[in-house]
Image (spheres, helix red, strand yellow):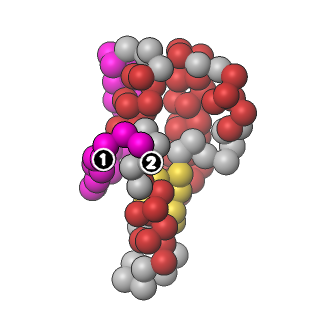
Amino acid sequence: MECVGKSTIVEILRRSQRLPKGTLFTREPTARFLRSKEESIHGDALFKLIVEDRAQHIEKDIIPELKIGTLVISDRYIPSTFVSQGVDGVSLDAIWEANKDFLVPNITFFITARAC
């Protein structure tokens, strides 16, 4: 959901001098995902595009960096999909099935806030 502060926290981390040089900051959906799709496509069709984007993101961006020891911080990942696509009418079972084999982060932060 919007207005919780996820991107703000990631930006604070990006500016931090405490993280290793070369830390990879990513965001989902990625730049390969056309934001205009979010405006015109909904439900299962949008969900499938998001899952495809995630698969490419992991394969092309995250795994190569992890293999060389890079710290990867991603703004949004699977838990965000449960929230946003669940609200969009995609079943939780479908979300789980599509995401269950993707990489599991070492740490996940859940941020809660009142709706804005």
* Element on which disc 2 rests: loop
Residue occupying image coordinates x 39% and y 22%? 86
Task: Tell me if residue 89 comes above or below residue 103 in the rendering.
Answer: above
In this figure, what is the number of numbered marks?
A: 2
In the shown orientation, is residue 49 left or right of residue 110? Answer: right
Please state which of residues 48 and 13 is positioned toward the viewer in this rendering: 13
Q: Could you say which quadrant of the image residue 32 lies in?
A: top right
Residue 36, percent from left and from top = 72, 33
Instruction: Identify the residue position indicated by label 2 in the image.
Output: 3
Q: Main secondary structure of the magenta part?
A: loop
Residue 49, percent from left and from top = 60, 27
Instruction: Identify the residue position indicated by label 1 in the image.
Output: 113
Classify the position of the N terminus by image quarter: top left
Residue occupying image coordinates x 37% and y 29%? 82
In the shown orientation, is residue 112 left or right of residue 43? Answer: left
Q: Could you say which quadrant of the image residue 71 lies in?
A: bottom left
Residue type, mark 1 in image = Ala
Residue 40, percent from left and from top = 69, 22
Please state which of residues 85 and 69 is positioned toward the viewer in this rendering: 85
Answer whether labels 1 and 2 touch (C-beta < 8 Å). yes
Please report whichever mark, 1 or 2, sits nearer to the chain's N-terminal start.
Answer: 2
Residue 100, percent from left and from top = 34, 29
Which segment did they paint magenta?
92-116
Please state which of residues 22 and 36 is positioned toward the viewer in this rendering: 36
* Residue 97 is inside the magenta segment: yes
Classify the position of the C terminus by image quarter: top left
